[in-house]
C-alpha cells in the first residue's frame, strides 16, 4: 500500500512539471535578433518594455492622446497591431484598445508579473512584450481592454 501511495504521489509531482509549463521554452518568431541588436535599435525605454517585460509610467505616453485615424504598429518590427477606431480612454494611463487589428498579429500567454494573474499580449512578429488584456473593457463591444505600453508602439496616421 505504501509503494502505491509513493507511486501515485511521484506521478502527481512529475505531472505538475510538464514541458508545457516550462517558461524557458520560447516560441520562435519571424523577426529574431540578438539582445545586442535589439539594444542597438530600440530606445532604452522601448527595450525595457519590449524585451524585458517592463512597464512604462502611467499617463506618460503621447499615444494616450492620439485620436486621429491610423494604425498603431510594434515599435520593434512595424507589425500592425491596433487601429484608432478601436481605441478608448480607459482612465488607466495607458493606450487601451478593445481588440487588435487581427488576432494573428498578437500572441497571448498567461502572466503572473506583479503578483496578479493576467494575459500578456506579445507581438506575433517579433515576440516583443506589449502589455496585458483584461476583461473590463467596453461592454458594448468586446468587453476586453488591451492595456498596451505606448513606448512599445509607433503611430502611423491613415494615408501614410
Image (cartoon, grey):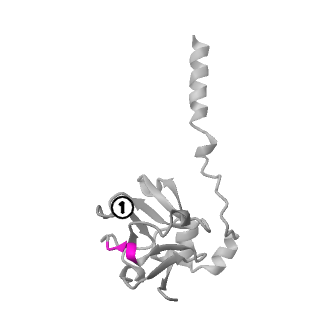
Question: Residue 126, position in %: x, y?
Answer: 62, 68
Residue at point 56%, 36% (across, down): 16
Q: Quadrant of residue 41?
A: bottom right
Spot occupied by residue 56 in the image (x, y as percentages of width and height): 45, 73
Image position of 115 (left or right of 73):
left
Residue at point 57%, 31% (across, down): 13
> Does 20 lie within the magenta span?
no
Name the quarter where the N terminus is drawn.
top right
Q: Which segment is the magenta one?
A: 85-89
With respect to residue 19, does 132 lie above or below? below
Q: How many marks?
A: 1
| Viewer-nearest residue: 28 or 39 | 28
Q: Can residue 94 be seen at all in this image of the molecule?
A: no
Residue drawn at point x = 69 percent, y = 75 percent: 37
Asked which quadrant contains residue 42, the reply is bottom right
Q: Residue at x 67, y 60 (%)?
A: 28
Q: Quadrant of residue 92?
A: bottom left
Q: Secondary structure at mark 1?
A: loop
What residue is disc 1 on? 142
Please indicate whether residue 26 sits to the left or right of residue 86 in the image. right
List x then y, in percent, for residue 12: 56, 29
Q: Nearer the viewer, residue 12 or 75?
A: 75
Q: Is residue 9 visible?
A: yes
The extreme top residue here reads 1
Amino acid at each position: 500500500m505504501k509503494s502505491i501511495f509513493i507511486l501515485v504521489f511521484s506521478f502527481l509531482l512529475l505531472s505538475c512539471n510538464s514541458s508545457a509549463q516550462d517558461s524557458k521554452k520560447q516560441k520562435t518568431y519571424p523577426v529574431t535578433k540578438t539582445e545586442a541588436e535589439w539594444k542597438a535599435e530600440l530606445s532604452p525605454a522601448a527595450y525595457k518594455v519590449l524585451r524585458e517585460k517592463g512597464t512604462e509610467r502611467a499617463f506618460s505616453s503621447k499615444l494616450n492622446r492620439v485620436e486621429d485615424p491610423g494604425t498603431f504598429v510594434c515599435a520593434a518590427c512595424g507589425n500592425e497591431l491596433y487601429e484608432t477606431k478601436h481605441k478608448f480612454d480607459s482612465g488607466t494611463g495607458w493606450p487601451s484598445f478593445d481588440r487588435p487589428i487581427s488576432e494573428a498579429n498578437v500572441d497571448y500567454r498567461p502572466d503572473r508579473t506583479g503578483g496578479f494573474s493576467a494575459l500578456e499580449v506579445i507581438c506575433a512578429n517579433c515576440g516583443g512584450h506589449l502589455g496585458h488584456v483584461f476583461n473590463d473593457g467596453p461592454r458594448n463591444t468586446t468587453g476586453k481592454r488591451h492595456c498596451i505600453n505606448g513606448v512599445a508602439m509607433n503611430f502611423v496616421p491613415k494615408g501614410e
